[in-house]
Image (cartoon, rainbow, N blue to C red):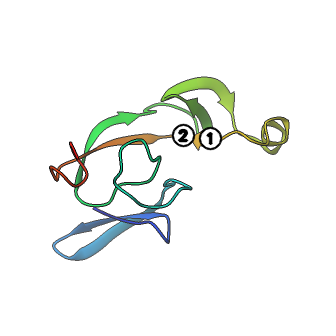
Amino acid sequence: MRVSLPAQTLHVERGGRLLKTYAVSTSKHGAGEIRGSFKTPRGRHVVRAKIGAGAPLNAVFRGRRRTGEIYSPELARAHPDRDWILTRILWLSGTEIGSNRLG
């Protein structure tokens, strides 16, 4: 798998062949590996947890937990400053010590 930060996509590949592309969301703060920077770390990762299995499309999450809300334009207008996390979360863990893990 490979994530393109500029395109906000996840590419699933096998044997150098693209199998599927998914839309993803990464940090609005850009890329970087400094702990606490709220940036998206680069490098190799493993999926630590898959959050949202069985959740309906556009289910809203805060703090990796479902709020019970379903995203809609009306909800967005009611909460204009909210950082929307919807439907699924892949919680990643870096595998490169000193770069994106334990660094």
The three-letter amino acid code for the residue at tag 1 is Asn
Residue 97's x, y, as percent?
15, 49
Q: Secondary structure at mark 1?
A: loop
For the point 63% across and 42% down, the residue is 84
Residue 8's x, y, as percent?
49, 64
Q: Which residue is mark 1?
A: 58
Classify mark 2: residues with Cα within 10 Å, few (<14), some (14-19) or many (20+).
some
User: In the image shown, does 50 or 64 lie closer to the viewer?
Assistant: 64
Q: Which residue is mark 2?
A: 87
For the point 84% across and 39% down, the residue is 74
Tell me whether circle 2 and circle 1 mark residues in contact (CB < 8 Å). yes
For the point 48% across and 40% down, the residue is 88
Quarter of the image for the N terminus: give it. bottom left
Residue 59's x, y, as percent?
60, 34
Rounded to the nearest whole Å, what is the CA distance between mark 2 and mark 1?
5 Å
* Image side of residue 55 versus residue 81, left or right: left
Residue 48's x, y, as percent?
27, 37
For the point 45% across and 64% down, the residue is 9
| Residue 1, above or below 98 | below
- Quick one: label 2 or label 1, which is nearer the N terminus? 1
